[in-house]
Amino acid sequence: MTNMATIERILVVCGLQNAGKSHLLRSMFIDPRLGTDRVIPTPRRIKPAALSRERCLQVRCTSPHEQAESIDDFFAELDRARRAAWRTFWRFNYACALQPNATAATPDAVAFCREMKGRLTPERIRLVQLDPRQDGRHGTLLSHSDVNQLRSMEVEVIVVDGRREPSGSQPPHGLMLADFFDFT
C-alpha cells in the first residue's frame, strides 16, 4: 500500500439511526488540540484534523448502514482518504459512525470491526456504544456474545451516555473521545 497513510487508531461510535453518533463524533472538536477553537463543526464532511506534523484524524459522521454502502465501498472511500492524507501526513487516524446491526448491504458492527482488524491492522480499535441515546431513551447495545467476540479481537468496548445537555452546554464525552487520539 504505497502512497497511502498508515492506519494507527480507529474509533467507532455505534448506535442506531438518530442515537446521536454524529453529534458525539463532532463533539470531539471541542478539544482545542484538534484546531477548532472549541467549535463543533456542522458540515456533513469534516476536513482532516492535524494531530501532529505527521498524523491526522479523519472523521466520518455518516454510518455506511444509513448510506446503504457495502463494506467494500466503505474501504474504498477510506483508502481514498488515506491516499489524500499521504500528501501531508503519513500516519492516519479514523473515527466513524456505525450501526450495530447488519443491513442488506452492510455487515453488523462485529463483522465490520473484524474486517477493519484484518484489512487495516491498526494498533487499536475502540468501539463506543451510546446508552442512553441523545433523546434519553435506552440505546441498542451489543449482546454479551458480540462484546466477547470484539474483546477476543482486542477491540476496546465502552458505553457512554449520549444524552444532550439540556442547558446547551457541550457534553464532556467529546473530550474523552478526543483523548483516544492523544499520542503525547
Image (tube, rainbow, N blue to C red):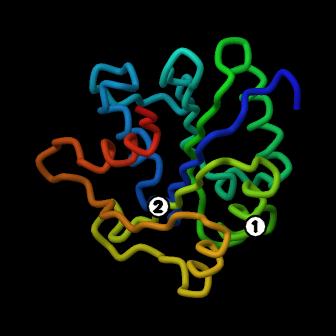
Query: Nearer the observer, disc 2 or disc 1?
Result: 2
Q: Quadrant of residue 182?
A: top left
Read off the residue under disc 2. Answer: 128
- Describe residue 164's horizontal placement relative to residue 160 as left or right: left
Name the kind of residue labelled 1 in the image: Pro
* Element carrying mark 2: strand
First in sequence: mark 2 or mark 1?
1
User: What is the C-alpha distance between the residues marked 2 and 1?
Assistant: 17 Å
Q: Residue at x 36, y 76 (%)?
A: 138
- Report the disc number at residue 107: 1
| Whole-percent x, y for residue 177 in the image | 39, 47
Quadrant in which the N terminus is drawn: top right
Which residue appears farthest toward the front when viewing the image? 184
| Whole-percent x, y for residue 78 in the image | 74, 38
User: Closer to the camera, 75 or 124?
Assistant: 124
| Whole-percent x, y for residue 64 in the image | 69, 52
* Element carrying mark 1: loop
